[in-house]
Amino acid sequence: MPAATRAILANGLVDWETAGELFDIPRSPHVQNVYQRDPFLFTVVLAISSRYLPSRPELHITAMYFAKHAAAIAFIDGMKSIEMAQAYLLMSVYGLPARRWEEDRSWSYGGLASRFPSTAPLSERHERERLNRARTWLNCFDVDRSSSTQWGPTGIHEDEVIRGAKAWHRGSKYNHSYDVHLVAYTELLKIVSRFHECIHTPSGSSPDFRPITETIEAEIRGWHDSVKWSYENESDRNDPANFVRLEGVPVFENYMRLVMYSFGFEDAWKRHGLEPGDMFFAKCLQSAMAVVRHLSEVYAPSGFLNAFLLKMLRPEFATLLDKESRK
């Protein structure tokens, strides 16, 4: 591994004591092990965790630049490993915010991550390593589909691992309780992907959104019931991290509903306008408000969510909103 990926220690930005403190934030005790296996992943974990180190508020931005430099060097070097994929995944989700969309590189990190688990062999000798690779690949799929939900085509097609995700978390004694949440998110994104496949027809003609949306809505309700049972029976509810994931379910579920219903909303609005009681308008409003009300104090509402709520306040939609909803 190039020396540049070890620069965060070599330059004295952090020492081993601080590194151990930073690794305690994501509850990972394996500082030396991660460093030996992949200094790039080590650097990324330090950089992201530094955001939550109150004793050194200036550290995060500088550390993230070290992480971005290490990401570029790792790509140029051409090496491939599961740890590199994990580092790129973390960069895609927890990178520094960009001022403009064209400056945002999170999508490119997700694309780089997906190159590694798919091209490396799946024949590890140890079961833990096989689970580690499958877990990373499912995360790659989730990042890819989360991005493509709004911005464009998918880069990862469903394979045996992704299609079998629903039962994967029960397949080994080494599976972690967090795998329940990973699989739940994967299954939700697979459902939303089927919606996109249905509405983007090869002929380019406008689909009938109502029956397609109602069919996928039924699948989401079935997913909700399945996830509720899994969380109650297969997840450790006393683990704070599991509790946070559980609280996030209504956010993911209703956000995906908003994205799905927004297509029918846009189509109806452009085609013939909207009448009071329109299903797509009502469902968009209901889904957006559910996200805001459920976790407004925990997660900052996304740009898409804010923009959609503001759109609903336009004068042309005044007859569709009652006073209570407008408030």
Image (spheres, rainbow, N blue to C red):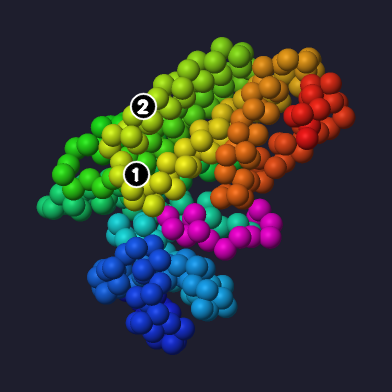
Residue marked by disc 2:
226
Please tell me in which quadrant of the rendered image residue 24 appears.
Answer: bottom left
Left-right relation of 82 to 250: left
- Would you say residue 115 is visible in this rendering? no
- Would you say residue 8 is visible in this rendering? yes
- Rounded to the nearest angstrom, the CA distance separating label 2 from label 1 is 16 Å
Which residues lie in the magenta part?
A: 89-102
Q: Kindly identify the amino acid type of the residue bearing the numbered disc 2.
A: Ser
Closer to the camera in the image, 58 or 102: 58
In percent of width and height, residue 112 lies at 43, 54
- Work out whether 160 lies above or below 243: above
Question: Which residue is pictured at 70% across the width and 23% down the height?
Answer: 281
Question: Which residue is pictured at 78% across the width and 15% down the height?
Answer: 276
Left-right relation of 144 to 84: right
For mark 1, does the 10 Å Cα neighbourhood hold few (<14), some (14 to 19), or many (20 or more) residues?
Answer: some
Residue marked by disc 1:
237
Residue 93 belongs to magenta span = yes
Q: Secondary structure at mark 1?
A: loop
